[in-house]
Image (tube, grey):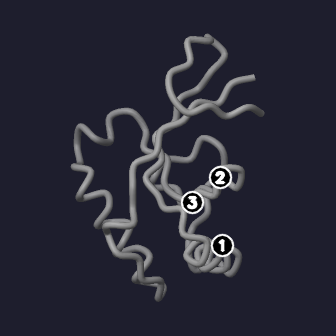
Amino acid sequence: MKIRLGFVSNSSSSSYLILGFTDEDVISQVREKVEKGALEGGGQGSSHEDGFLFFDENNLVGWDIWEGVLETKTLFRLKQEMVNKLASVGIVVPIERIHLHQFEVWS
């Protein structure tokens, strides 16, 4: 799999918006909570409601923000939902550390 930041015009590409964080300490805490079943972990094709996705090659963990989500919720509200979800299992992440990431995957 190849990952590229920015625009890709190749028809076999997929674009992703991930709301997440790159802090290694927090990533390991989230991974541990997912493995123990305290947090949901999503798979390919998961939405932000299905759990946290791990993008190891980008050192990124977050929610896949599907088309239309930002039409019904603000980015700030989604960040607050993530902060609250993590806090519910004892993981503290300041809202300022959560960012919207965009990348392309193509074959």
C-alpha separation, residue under disc 3 versus residue under disc 1 = 9 Å
Which numbered disc, 3 or 2, marks the residue that appears first in the sequence?
2
Which percent across, then down, holds residue 102?
48, 38
Residue at the disc numbered 1: 31
Residue neighbourhood size for the residue with mark 1, other residues' Cα within 10 Å, grouped as few (<14), some (14–19), many (≥20): some
Q: Report the side of 48 relative to 14 (left or right).
A: left
Q: Which residue is mark 2?
A: 55
- Image quarter where the C terminus lies is top right
Asked if 89 appears above or below 53 in the picture, the reply is below
Residues at circles 3 and 1 in contact by the CB criterion of under 8 Å: yes
Whole-percent x and y of residue 100?
40, 48
Element class at badge 2: strand
Q: Which residue position holds label 3?
A: 61
Residue at figure coordinates x 65%, y 52% from the top left? 55
Judging depth in this view, the residue of 45 and 94 nearest the camera is 94
Q: Residues within 10 Å of mark 3 (few under 14, many from 20)?
A: many
Quick check: marks 3 and 2 in contact, CB under 8 Å?
Answer: yes
Kindly report the distance in space between the C-alpha atoms of the residues bearing marks 1 and 2: 11 Å
- Tell me which label, 3 or 1, sits earlier in the chain: 1
User: Considering only vertical position in the picture, is 77 above or below 68?
Assistant: below
Residue at image point 60% right, 56% down: 53
Tell me the element at label 1.
helix
